[in-house]
Image (cartoon, rainbow, N blue to C red):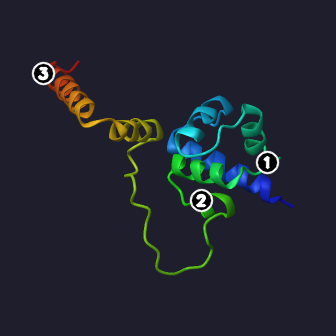
């Protein structure tokens, strides 16, 4: 019989993989506080990933933000009932985890820095467009 903790660990691993984020305690140790969670040790994160413990609520919410899920679905799974439900349209399927994190970092920058990043991207895109394809 699957425990609540082991079922959560499976959901978390699958959600991280789907988001293109490595299921690593050292990676999550940096991301959890950045997304509103509490500072947590790699050992604690390892216990989440191995199904020994569940994270505290603040860290559960941060994990859900990281993988683009609702916190209750990450913790308990998606509801099995059928019916009308709005799709999660926060990010298109082609935008992977690390790109989402970079975009969210960009959006947190002050306007002047965002302008510089946009100019850099435009310059790189123009340079790439001018190169002949191999």
Q: Find the distance from the CA under tag 1 to the CA under tag 2.
A: 17 Å
Disc on the earlier residue, 1 or 3:
1
Q: Nearer the viewer, mark 3 or mark 2?
A: 2
- Contact between marks 1 and 2 (CB within 8 A): the answer is no
Mark earlier in primary sequence (1, 2): 1
Q: Position of residue 16 (x, y in %)?
A: 58, 44
Q: How many marks?
A: 3
Image coordinates of residue 38 in percent, x first then y, are 64, 43
Camera-near label (1 vs 2) is 2
Check contact, mark 1 vs mark 3: CB within 8 A: no
Q: Which residue is mark 3?
A: 130
Q: Nearer the viewer, mark 1 or mark 3?
A: 1
Q: Quadrant of the C terminus?
A: top left
Count residues near mark 3 (Cα–Cα under 10 Å), then give few for <14, some for 14-19, many for 20+.
few
At x 67%, y 55%, the residue is 57
Between residues 7 and 48, which one lies in front from this camera angle?
48
Q: Earlier in the sequence, mark 3 or mark 2?
A: 2
The tag on residue 17 is: none
Residue for point 62% across, 57% down: 74
Q: Mark 3 falls on what kind of element?
A: helix
Location of residue 33 by image quarter: top right
Q: Is residue 116 above or below residue 85?
A: above
Say which residue label 1 marks: 51
Say if 45 sits above or below 83 in the image. Answer: above
Q: Secondary structure at mark 1?
A: loop
The N terminus - image quarter: bottom right
Mark 2 lies on residue = 71
Q: Secondary structure at mark 2?
A: helix
């Amino acid at each position: 019989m699957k425990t609540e903790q082991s079922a959560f660990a499976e959901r978390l691993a699958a959600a991280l993989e789907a988001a293109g984020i490595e299921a690593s305690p050292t990676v999550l140790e940096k991301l959890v506080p950045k997304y509103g969670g509490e500072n947590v040790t790699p050992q604690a994160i390892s216990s989440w990933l191995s199904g020994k413990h569940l994270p505290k609520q603040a860290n559960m919410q941060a994990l859900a933000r990281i993988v683009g899920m609702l916190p209750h679905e990450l913790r308990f799974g998606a509801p099995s009932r059928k019916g009308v439900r709005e799709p999660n349209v926060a990010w298109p399927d082609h935008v992977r985890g690390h790109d989402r994190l970079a975009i969210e970092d960009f959006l947190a920058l002050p306007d002047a820095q965002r302008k510089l990043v946009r100019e850099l991207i435009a310059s790189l895109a123009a340079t790439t467009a001018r190169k002949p394809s191999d």
